[in-house]
Image (cartoon, helix red, strand yellow):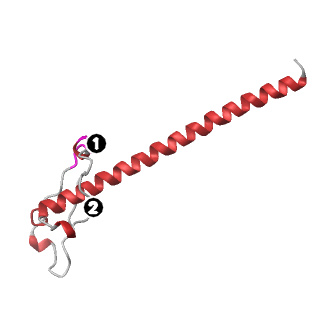
């Protein structure tokens, strides 16, 4: 083989290896973005369901409804928290501090 063909072959191999590494990196980043997006979707759906269970009016709720009807399937164990009065006794929260609703995943 001539030096030129050796150089061309090694350049082609290096380019293919760099492309494969770049594709692997992009795939890994896509998986991380999808995971974070799903976690946020589950969190928002749980907050919405918890506030719905507490009787918060629709226009005052936080989070988002389960538009895609997938929370029960992709967020196993997701359940809204108990109403605040069942979480702790009323004396546990001072009257001057608002009660916080906990969301359990």
Residue 103 in view, yes or no: no
Q: Determine if the magenta segment contains residue 21.
A: no
Residue 45, percent from left and from top: 25, 54
Quadrant housing residue 4: top right
Of the image marks 2 and 1, the number of the one nearer the N terminus: 2
Query: Would you name the residue on which mark 1 appears?
Result: 74
Residue stretch rendered in magenta on the structure: 73-78
Residue displayed at 24% across by 40% down: 73
Query: Closer to the camera, 91 or 44?
Result: 44
Residue 44 in view, yes or no: yes
Q: Secondary structure at mark 2?
A: loop
Q: Secondary structure at mark 1?
A: helix
Q: Quadrant of the N terminus?
A: top right
- How many other residues sit within 10 Å of disc 1, few (<14), some (14-19) or many (≥20)? few
Cβ–Cβ below 8 Å for labels 2 and 1? no
Decide if residue 34 is on the left or right side of residue 47: right
Quadrant housing residue 10: top right
Give me the disc on residue 61.
Answer: none
Residue 69, percent from left and from top: 23, 46
Query: Would you name the residue on which mark 2 appears?
Result: 63
């Amino acid at each position: 083989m001539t030096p030129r063909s050796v150089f061309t072959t090694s350049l082609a191999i290096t380019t293919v290896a760099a492309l494969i590494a770049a594709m692997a990196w992009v795939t890994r980043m896509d998986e991380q973005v999808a995971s974070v997006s799903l976690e946020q979707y589950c969190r928002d759906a749980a907050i919405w369901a918890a506030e719905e269970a507490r009787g918060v009016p629709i226009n005052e709720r936080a989070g988002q409804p389960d538009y895609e009807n997938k929370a029960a399937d992709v967020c196993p164990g997701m359940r809204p928290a108990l109403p605040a009065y069942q979480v702790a006794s009323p004396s546990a929260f001072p009257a001057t501090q608002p009660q916080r609703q906990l969301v359990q995943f």
